[in-house]
Image (cartoon, rainbow, N blue to C red):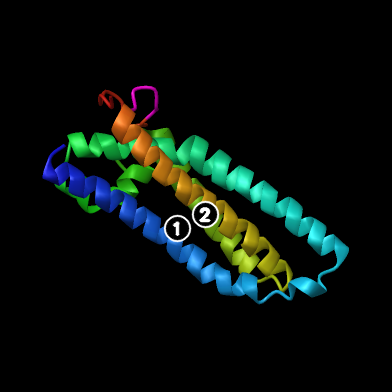
Amino acid sequence: MTLLGCISVFWAYFGFSFLIASAIVRLTPIALEVSWLNLSAVQYIFAAIFTVFMIYAEGIGGFHKKLAPRFAARAKHLSRNPRWLHILLAPFFCVGYFYANRKRVITSFALTFAIVILVIIVHQMPQPWRGIIDVGVILGLFTGLMSMGFWLVRVHLHGYSEIETDLPEGIQGK
């Protein structure tokens, strides 16, 4: 891998990981505001179910099975085929906001829009519900962040021929 390729991979992962880690850092104080010893039985049950759901749905289903492998494969493609604009916007390139097939671009923007709407809705919720939800989100994001590291190592050591890169039609992604 060339120096430019290494820089592009580093920037893609660092940039994206910074966004995820900053969300975790911003949500943690809100989750810690909850008086966990004073919750009702319903709130404890909801917290447990929602946390498990978020770890599975967001961390495993969203990140580990979908985003992280594609992100890693696109980062590997970028390292082999560096273009200045793609390197400059590497975190967004690897997510699939641009230089991807139409379905991927639409899906990436739609998912981002949906997440923004959910963040706005949850932000309006009172404690302890907001804190309970934020715990699930934090643990889901943390699981996703660990998955990103796993796929970074896996793809860069073993390749990515079996992973869909969602590059534009006619572009060889392997």
* Residue 156 x %, y %: 30, 35
Are the residues flagged by discs 2 and 1 in contact, CB closer than 8 Å?
Answer: no
Q: Is residue 38 left or right of residue 58?
A: right
- Residue 106: quadrant of the picture: top left
Identify the residue shown where x is 42% and y is 41%: 150
Which corner quadrant holds the C terminus?
A: top left
For residue 142, which numbered disc appears in the image? Answer: 2
**What is the span of residues highlighted in magenta in the rendered image?**
159-164
- Residue in the foreground of this view, choosing between 30 and 112: 30
The answer to whether residue 168 is seen in the rendering is no
In this rendering, is residue 164 above or below 62? above
In this rendering, is residue 62 above or below 170? below
* Residue 144 x %, y %: 50, 48
* Residue 164 x %, y %: 39, 28
Badge 2 local density, few (<14 within 10 Å), some, or many (20+)? Answer: some
**22 magenta-colored:** no
Numbered disc 2: secondary structure: helix
Q: Is residue 58 left or right of residue 21?
A: right
Identify the residue shown where x is 48% and y is 64%: 23
Question: What residue does disc 1 label?
Answer: 20
Q: Which numbered disc flags the more N-terminal residue, 2 or 1?
A: 1
In this rendering, is residue 162 above or below 32? above
Q: Main secondary structure of the magenta part?
A: loop
The answer to whether residue 51 is seen in the rendering is yes
**Which residue is situated farthest in the left direction here?**
3
Identify the residue shown where x is 63% and y is 50%: 54
